[in-house]
Amino acid sequence: MQSSAHTADGAENLPRLAGHFASLEVQNHAARLGMWLFLATEILLFAGLFVCYGCYRFLYPEAWAAGSRSLDLTMGTVNTIVLITSSLTAALAVHYAKEGENKKVGVMFALTLLMAVGFLVIKYFEYAHKFHIGTLPGRYYHYEGIQVTGIPLYFTVYFCSTALHAFHVVIGMAVLSVAMVRAFRKKDFGPKNYTMVELGSMYWHLVDLVWIFLFPMLYLV
Amino acid sequence: MTPSSSIDTAGAAPHDEHHDHHPSYLVDGTTIKSWLLTVDHKRIGLMFLFFILLFFLVGGIFALLIRVELLTPGATIMDAMTYNRTFTLHGLVMIFLFMIPAIPAVFGNFMLPLMLGAKDVAFPRLNLASLYIYLTGAVFMLWGMLNGGLDTGWTFYTPYSTHTTTTVAPVMFGAFIIGFSSIATGINFIVTCHTMRAPGITWFKMPLFVWAIYATSCIQVLATPVIGLLTVLVAVENLFSFGMFDPARGGDPVLFQHLFWFYSHPAVYIMVLPAFGVMSEVVSTYSRKNIFGYRAVAYSSLGIAFVGFFAWGHHMFVSGQSTFDAGVFGVLTMLVGVFTAIKVFNWVGTVYKGAVDFKTPFAYFCGFLFFTVFGGMTGIALGTVSLDVAWHDTYFVVAHFHFIMVGATIMAFLAALHYWFPKMFGKTYHEGWGLVSAALIILGFNATFIPQFLLGNNGMPRRYYDYPERFQALNVASTAGASLLAFGFIIIAMYLTYALLYGKAAGKNPWRSKGYEWMSEAPPPTHNFVGPQPTFPEEPHFYVDPKKAEVPDAV
Amino acid sequence: MAIANESHQEEKNMDAHHGAGRYWLIWGVLLVLTVVTVVTGRMHLPSFGLLLALVIATVKGTLVTLYFMHLAEHRGANRLVFGVSILFVVLMLVIPMADLGTRFRGANPPGSQYSDLQPADIGTGTQRGRFGGGVRQTETKDTPETPAPHH
Amino acid sequence: MSEFLNNLLFLPESASTFAERVDFLHHFVVGTTMVMSAGVGLVALFMFFRYRRRVPAQTTEYVVPTLATEFLFVSVPLVFFLAWFGIGFRDFTWVTTPPKDAMDVYVMGKQWMWKFSYPEGPNGVNVLHVPANRPVRLLITSRDVLHSFYVPSFRIKMDALPGRYSQIWFEATKPGTYQVLCTEYCGLSHSKMLAEVVVLPQEEYDNWIKDQRRGRLQDRQDALADTSLVPPVARMVEQGQVLAGTQGCLKCHSVDGSQHIGPTFLGMYDRVEKLDDGQTIRVDEAYITQSMMDPGAHLVSGYQNVMPTYQGKLQGPETAAIVEYIKSLRTPNVREGASEGPAYDPIQ
């Protein structure tokens, strides 16, 4: 039941069609829907922490204000810009994949990865500072500067959510690396075969999306 | 092909003449590797069946230990610490390792593609991965159980779970891993329903089992990540004292309960919705009727899945939750009850003007109907806010959820096992023993849990190692019932094993069912259908005489 | 050909292919919004600061999902999945918060906005790590107050 | 009638105003359930027989419900369910909103006992005295993990949250003694966390409380529960140190971790000890107090039962001071006692 539209352009790079799918478009549809469902689970995963954030913020507004003021806004803003830009390059990679420009796809992903590393390095400096002054979660909190009820909880939420996010950054980097290597080596992305690039990039955008919410929640308000 | 099913030749014709040349999935590759690395949904389903039965045995042994311990007040066969671990492990094994994957991962996996006329699920390799993820999680859990065990109860409420000295972290981590298996299965089934339906199968011609699995998968995908996060938080809290839910550090244990029940309440629908789906198939087949109110049953599955998400707070009426929230959750709980009632009425309605053949699966249907009605109605009673104040955390709750969640699911699991046994293995079992053991199990189940309803009324709290003398008589009755139940399971194990080895060949469709899954061979070949994707012109379970088959639109 | 599902429609939707300029435009908007949210965030606006930040974040998030993730072109189930997950997040957030706001005040954590109880200091030697360890800067009373009779 | 139903359903004696409300709804719900399920069951059984299969490959009619049927399926249960919810929620609001003239009692759960204290004293362990026919508000809290205060005969239950208060109220209708059970799993001896509510007629209750307040402090079951006479903790530790010397504790117990006739005090608090009968116990205030008063009750394995009782030799506050002194001797490897929650002080 291969649809005629696809058998026509046989010269083109076509992805392997798994035997149990009726046609390529069904396979792509399945992959995309599966990815969206997976992203939904990721959203719900972070939602648990957002609920903790929301509830404790509701209970301890002063601690939250004090906690967010103690964070380094400059580093946070830089990180936001880095991540948004990396999202742009990831989106451009999909764009070039559709046009079959494999080299540009690889370069875009390389840039994305570079910015991801940058993000993690900045994050490392932020963490190091916190370990130094003692704004740590739960019972490890020993910063004299802020003593408000609930302040260790703020840092518990801060560390849990940023660590979970950083973990997702690392996973995203792994996924994008695979796509990048393929773009450079196999060079087989094209208008009919870009699902892998698209899904990898969707995952990366989700990482960006989570940060877009984490940033104002943790640093600004 | 049986004479009765001559009218579906139109649907199943293309592969009929080929079937001699294609070996069944059971013998298509006989090496161990061909099983362990298979991507065939049927083989994966069978492997799940094997492990799930194994864990059911483990959980069942824990259950019997609990019942024996409760024969007398005070110590009977174990000390308090062992008892606390035993009931915790009973809960964890039965819920995470048996009930949640039981029907979806075994029968869902096996039947869903067959019912949709697909060659496999959408992501076969993910499907295999989900089996191994499940096993990895199970290994972590078992390792934790053997190395100290866990004594928090399966609910692992903070702050007890974050301070107990027993091995919380490995068990939590195991539960976290199993969550991925559940998610993978869920994503796979949803995508399969959306993209793999054969020509002719529109949304409202999908078998009701598929609808139920679809609704279940939605819950799995949306709820499981939350418990995943929560298990990690509890494990981290236990190891490092981050204070997220520790009242001593300003955390709120009631918030933990909100998050916990956000998963764990929908989780009971993960367990029971597939059971509803199985029963819709069974009742149609054995009374040879299209389901009464197809759309009502299909929509009520989705309704339960959706509303069930927002009824979680009825586990927390006396936890210090606000009266306002109690009211909101109370109303939503009633809606879940209404959706279930719709299903019950429609199942009974299906028998109307049908042609009932009282075979073993139908016997389980009767048991199921009983457990669902009583389990469901006691659920409504518990959801009636003021009554819950008296009943909360007593044996009444224990009996209630064993009726609705366990009773209904076990009935459906056994019904499915018997109903699809010829489909899966191509063999028949002994009908007489089937009916005897069904009677034993249904009686045993009642004898075990009806005394527990009364115990709860009488005021015996759950998770009690020791109890005042006045509760003893009912406890003895309950233990006696449990032994009857165990006896029933032993009989099933014996005659099914016998049937597996020496059973007579069943033929393609021994029940003469018009369910979509019966339109392929039994047991099916590796890719289910030979040749192009088959088409399905009729709706499932269409038993109308072809001469007068002018059908009004289903409601 | 007769496949009873939405794949064909989906593929048609995906055919649309735009120039790269659109991505750069979205990127620009995202950067501007980031600057706006940082600037307004620094002002520490009294009541609507949180609301404003969340609105901006939502707009940014919507842009990313619609255009970077191509949700604008993905229709049907893909949108449904995303929409439902967002709905669930919101409900999951609102219901526990409604609980905190409306429950018996004594049942909220001591020292929090919705409790009448002072956070308790207990004993010597146990302070460290309890409410943030260290020495409390402000002296609080030794005993918590009686919860106000709540009728 | 309702007596008979209660016996049939194994319900315990109903002894509060709330119990009467609960039982009414209970009978309503259970009765309706029985009638409806019997109806559904009988209809099903009838149809199994009436529509039994006559030919193996029988064909059947295509039957679909009318809209009215489906409407009936939805509306009948809905009406009943919402009615029950309405009654139930009204009663729930009633039981969580104490009347203004309610008498307050503070209840504290800890592993594994209940402490009760009245705003003007006295305090008690495991026995709560209340007058009959008078609303009593319970303000419930916990010292360590979650507990739940449950009186089957009153049909009331409320969780005890560490460091916070939850409330519920009742009005006992009959004098008598009623059992209290803990219904939230709280660890090893969860099932032994029992207590009693003693309901007295008003005059007897007045006499009882007068007696209690007359100052028979040495007879109190647990000096710790009453902090009205106890100095702040810091001074208690010093006082305890002095007392440990003068009372002779240090002759047998070391404070530096070295072994002696008795277990060392260093790091003793919160330690999990193995008893000579094979059970384990966490050393908490209750256990230390008990060991001073009745040293042979729970012996830590490896030690002889040689310690004399200090019953009557120590005043309540002195016992408390020694306990605080032992608590202050903690080694860093002993887990921080975070599970205690914010300190609970009976409200003065």
Image (cartoon, coloured by chain):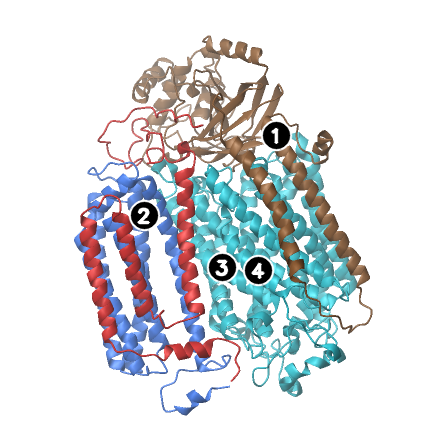
Chain colours: A blue, B cyan, C red, D brown
Residue placed most toward the observer, B310 or D191: B310
Q: Quadrant of the N terminus of chain B?
A: bottom right
User: Within the image, what quadrant is residue A106 found in?
Assistant: bottom left
How far separated are the C-alphas under marks 4 and 3? Answer: 14 Å
Q: Secondary structure under badge 1?
A: helix
Which residue is the site of mark 1? D19
Residue placed most toward the observer, D210 or B335: B335
Q: Are marks 4 and 3 on the same chain?
A: yes
Callout 4: few (<14), some (14-19), or many (20+) C-alpha neighbours within 10 Å?
Answer: many
Q: Are marks 2 and 4 on the same chain?
A: no
- Placement of D93 over or under D56, stated as above or below: above
How far separated are the C-alphas under marks 2 and 1? Answer: 43 Å
Residue B429 x, y percent position in the rendering: 74, 67
Residue A45 x, y percent position in the rendering: 39, 56
How far separated are the C-alphas under marks 3 and 1? Answer: 40 Å
How far separated are the C-alphas under marks 3 and 2? Answer: 26 Å
Q: Taking C106 as reference, is D155 left or right?
A: right
Callout 2: few (<14), some (14-19), or many (20+) C-alpha neighbours within 10 Å?
Answer: many
What residue is rendered at 29% in x and 65% in y? C63
Which residue is the site of mark 3? B220
Which residue is the site of mark 2? A157
Q: Are marks 2 and 4 in contact (CB under 8 Å)?
A: no
Which residue is the site of mark 4? B301
Residue placed most toward the observer, B73 or D67: D67
What residue is rendered at 52% in x and 70% in y? B193
Q: Are marks 3 and 1 on the same chain?
A: no
Tell me the mark number nearer the camera, choosing from 3 and 1. 1
How many tags in the picture? 4
